[in-house]
Amino acid sequence: MVNYPLSIQSFEDLRLSKCVYVDKTDYVYNLSYHGKTYFLARPRRFGKSLLCNTLLAFFEGKKELFEGLKIYELEKDWIKYPIIYLDFVSGDYTSGSMTLIDKIKIALQDYENQYGVNFDDSFFQIQDGESLIKSESRKLSFRLEHDLQAVYEKTGLKTVMIVDEYDNPLIKSVNLETDKDIYRGFFSVLKYSDKYLRFVFLTGVTKFAKTSIFSGTNQPDDISLDPNYSGICGITHEELLTNFKDEIQAFADQEVVSFDEIVGKLKKWYDSYLFHERGEKVINPVSLFNALKKKDFQNYWYTTGTPTILMQRIKNSTFDIKTLKKDVMYPKDALKDYKDDEIKTAIVPLLYYTGYLTIKSYDKEDRSYLLGFPNYEVESSFFNSLAEEFYSTVENPNGLDYLKFKEDFRNGDIESVIERLKALLCTLPYANDKSAKLIERDFQNVIYLVFTILGEYIVSEAHFSKGRADSILINKEYVYIFEFKIDQDAQTALNQINVKNYAGSFKMDNRKIYKIGVSFSSEEKNIVEWVSEEE
């Protein structure tokens, strides 16, 4: 039985418990000797915390943990450095800014205790009208500056700072500007105390604007889109076949298929993340390990939790989710320089950094990336998460019940399909000041989400010689051809299906063909009429 490192973030625990480990320690060595301050953005559950903990063990000089790994022969000194380790993965940052302040204070206290350093704050004066949060925040910057210098003078060694998921408190913050001020004051010290620092490494999902970490001089070297570090997290194709050959064969034996078929299916479900056009494609490690351990293809990434803030932003923005039915172009420089909350409507780069989109190709002349869903698991995660955000209500907490939709389509029950669509449209919180264009977009998003999540053979805006149909759904028994009209009668929609002969290419099919015209009223904000006929 292979011991997979699921839910293990400690490199020391992983090594002592003899978990399988894909050797990334050459990256650790290169980072430590070819730069000083770094930032790495990767999607959640992609191995950032394990990487931070591997760096921690290396800078603690724990040579014995690295025996047999690439770095064991590369590193000669194995010096134990002073370390400040800030882990923002855990903590309820929705409870207010003091949680963030306390988290930093605890890390500094551990650092001081380890090296016998005492920060005397008796001289610290609270300014007139200053809040407790502002006072405590200002004190942190003084304390960090004092501690870095004191530890250096006491040990003669520079300090290593590792910050895991720095942006988690900001993503969940209820006082975003206040928390960015806390960061601005605290991390600004790194610029002025550079001579006391050996190495600084920060991870997150994305960069936030207007924090000292990513503004002004001495910004971290952002290796998120660096070809030299494209495989630093995740499992490359070579690593998959080198490290998990026996496990893949065991999976293939259980399924009574070939080795190559299992590899192909693993890639279809979990592969094709690309973090630079010249980089290596990688597989999501959590999903891969779960699939190999359970010998079952499931949506493991979705069950680990989805960034609620992302789904809320899409819901509250003017973003048209139908644009994602095809890959989208985005400028390389804009993607590299993107900072969250700087451009409120920039949904595409946020989808990239949270792992829903990845690089498919690169246009060198235009310096633009073609971005799309990396794999089947992520695409289904996206639409399921969005459906939950759009359609969950107090009366219907589970959101879209797609199984009932599937049952209706498999039974040829068009009336039930329409009634379910009308019920879903009633759950949308239409604002009174919404323009007709936005109301139309919301209606189209409902239709697109429902049809996409159903998982049948769906064709949206299918092209024919005389035009294109809005949506076509095909299953074993039926072909459904839908045409939707906004503020026009349903017969007009049905007439278009007939005039354009959308059903023509299916006439030789043995399945029953239904043509459905649907009318949506922007005033009523719902479906008001529908007609259908069989071919």
Image (spheres, rainbow, N blue to C red):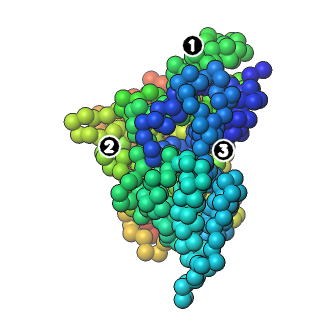
Neighbours of disc 2 within 10 Å: few (<14), some (14-19), many (20+): some
Question: Residue 473 location in percent, x, y?
Answer: 51, 38
Residue 73 visible in the picture: yes
Q: Residue flagged by tag 3: what amino acid is it? A: Thr
Q: Residue at x 61, y 70 (%)?
A: 97
Q: Nearer the viewer, residue 462 or 17?
A: 17
Secondary structure beneath disc 2?
helix
Mark nearer the N terminus (3 vs 2)? 3
Mark nearer the N terminus (3 vs 1)? 1
98 horizontally vs 152: left or right:
right
Check disc 1 and report the residue beneath it.
Answer: 260
Mark nearer the N terminus (2 vs 1)? 1
Q: Which numbered mark, 3 or 1, is in the foreground of this view?
A: 3
Q: Which numbered mark, 2 or 1, is in the foreground of this view?
A: 2
Q: Are marks 3 and 1 in contact (CB under 8 Å)?
A: no
Q: CA distance from mark 3 to mark 1?
A: 28 Å
Question: Residue 521 location in percent, x, y?
Answer: 45, 64
Label total for image: 3
Q: Quadrant of residue 499?
A: top left
Q: CA distance from mark 2 to mark 1?
A: 34 Å
Check disc 2 and report the residue beneath it.
Answer: 332
Q: Residue at x 23, y 40 (%)?
A: 366
Question: Residue 143 location in percent, x, y?
Answer: 58, 66
Q: Which numbered mark, 3 or 2, is in the foreground of this view?
A: 2
Q: Residue flagged by tag 1: what amino acid is it? A: Asp
Check disc 3 and report the residue beneath it.
Answer: 304
